[in-house]
Image (spheres, rainbow, N blue to C red):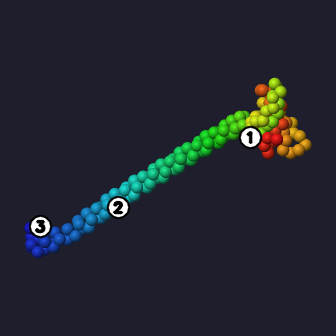
């Protein structure tokens, strides 16, 4: 190529540059695109992972809530049992003790296993035979009579 003049050689080089540079730019664009795609994929994966994590967190929270609810219900049932066993409600009672003395007390009506209930015709009077002290009381919800 020594026969080429400097201006034509310059043109030739210039042409080569024009041909090389766009190819380089294309390659850079492709690489850039590839990088962007990889980053997007990574972000999607992270989002999916985050979504899974959130989902798992929600599941755990729900499980915890259910467990708490069950525990509360259990406690409530236990309390109810205790209440019904010890003091369903107390009624006023008046009666006679074993020694013949008159008794007038606020009497706790216990569970059916511990007491026998006999209802009279009048709605507010209940005859309660308590098995422990073996007293028979005539109880009324209105108060001692």
Residue nearest the viewer, comparing 77 with 127:
127
Of residue 108 and residue 79, the one placed in the foreground of this image is: 108
> Which residue in the protein does label 3 denote?
1
Point out residue 98 in the picture as x, y percentages from the top left corner.
82, 25
Q: Which residue extends farthest front?
A: 101
Q: Nearer the viewer, residue 117 or 12?
A: 117
Residue 17 placement (x, y as % from top left): 20, 68
Residue 108, given in percent of the width and then of the height, sits at 74, 36
Question: Residue 58 vs residue 123: left or right?
Answer: left
Residue at the image position 15 percent from the left and 73 percent from the top: 11
| Residue placed under numbered mark 1 in the picture | 89
Q: CA distance from mark 3 to mark 1?
A: 119 Å
The residue indicated by pointer 2 is 33
Which residue is situated farthest in the bottom direction here?
7
* 12 vs 77: above or below: below
Is residue 21 visible in the rendered structure shown here? Answer: yes
Q: Residues within 10 Å of mark 3 (few under 14, many from 20)?
A: few
Relative to 117, is 78 on the left or the right? left
């Amino acid at each position: 190529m020594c026969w080429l003049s400097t201006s034509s050689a310059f043109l030739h080089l210039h042409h080569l540059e024009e041909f090389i540079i766009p190819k380089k730019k294309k390659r850079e664009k492709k690489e850039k695109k590839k990088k962007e795609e990889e980053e997007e994929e990574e972000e999607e994966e992270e989002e999916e992972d985050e979504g899974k994590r959130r989902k798992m967190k929600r599941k755990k929270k729900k499980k915890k809530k259910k467990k708490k609810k069950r525990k509360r219900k259990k406690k409530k049932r236990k309390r109810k049992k205790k209440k019904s066993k010890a003091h369903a409600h107390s009624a006023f009672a008046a009666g006679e003790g074993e020694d013949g003395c008159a008794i007038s007390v606020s009497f706790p009506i216990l569970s059916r296993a511990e007491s026998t209930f006999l209802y009279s015709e009048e709605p507010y009077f209940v005859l309660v035979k308590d098995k422990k002290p073996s007293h028979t009381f005539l109880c009324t919800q209105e108060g001692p009579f």
